[in-house]
Every structure is written in C-alpha cells, then in structure tokens.
Amino acid sequence: MNTLARTIAAGAAAGAAGTTVLNAITYLDMALRARPASSTPEESARRLAHALGTELPGDEEQQQNRAAGLGPSLAWGRASAPVSWPPRSVPWDGGPDGCSGPWPPRQRSYWRRTHR
C-alpha cells in the first residue's frame, strides 16, 4: 500500500473511530438524562422540501419516516462542502481589507500575489 492510500485509510479509520465514540457518548447521555433524540434534522428535511415547493410523499407516518431518514443525510452535504470547495478554485481577492477571508493568512497572501 502506498503512502497516500495508507494515509487515507488511517484517516478513514480515525474518522470511523471518532464517530463511533461520539455516537456512544450521545446515546449514553440520552439514556442517563432520559432525553429524546433531536428533531432538528427532521425539521430541516421538512423545511427544505417546503422551500423547494413540495412535500415529502406518503401519508403522515411515511412522511415522518422519510424526514427521519433524510434529515441526517443533509449533514453529509454540509460536511463534504469544504472537501469539494478548495480555495484555489474560488475567485476571492482577500476581502476589502486585503487580509480577511476563509483561509489562513499564508494561503491568502499566496492568493493575493498570484491573482492580482
């Protein structure tokens, strides 16, 4: 296995381990404090459908089940956005003050030097 593949595999394993621990702690907290799961992901799925001018198909129970499945999936889009949006592909001039922006100063100064 080459170095890149090994690095990707190690990162995936670390991410899976971290997610597993986070889920375990979350469900333990829910059990200890007797609190329900968050309804925010389901509400987000319903709001997105409404914003698109449609409703989730099916009767009330099916809509609830679809929202429960779609809601957490919306997080994948938000989580993958930084990976699919590298700074070099964005026409950003560093902002009006020349040094503000979503990237570290070193990348901003490189962007200003190469794109002005």
Image (cartoon, rainbow, N blue to C red):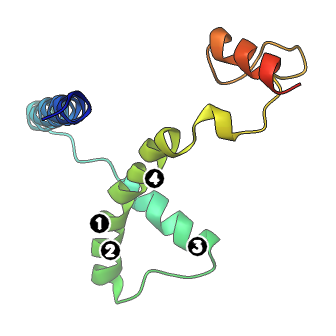
Image position of 111 (left or right of 77) = right
**The N terminus sits in image quarter:** top left
SS for callout 3: helix
Task: Say what amino acid the circle numbered 1 marks.
Answer: Gly
Q: Nearer the viewer, mark 4 or mark 2?
A: 4
Q: Which mark is residue 77?
A: 4
- Please provide percent x and percent y for residue 57: 41, 87
Which residue occupies 35% across, 58% down? 73
Residue 52 can be seen, yes or no? yes
Ranked by sequence position, the earlier of labels 3 and 4 is 3
Q: Quadrant of residue 91?
A: top right
Ranked by sequence position, the earlier of labels 4 and 1 is 1
Mark 2 = which residue? 66
Mark 3 = which residue? 50
Task: Say what amino acid the circle numbered 2 marks.
Answer: Arg
Q: Quadrant of residue 93?
A: top right
CA neighbours of label 1 inside 10 A, class few (<14), some (14 to 19), many (20+):
some
- Please provide percent x and percent y for residue 107: 65, 17
CA neighbours of label 2 inside 10 A, class few (<14), some (14 to 19), many (20+):
some
Which residue occupies 57% across, 42% down? 85
SS for callout 1: helix
Image position of 108 (left or right of 37) = right
- Please provide percent x and percent y for residue 12: 20, 36
Q: CA distance from mark 3 to mark 4?
A: 18 Å
Task: Say what amino acid the circle numbered 3 marks.
Answer: His
Image position of 110 (left or right of 93) = left
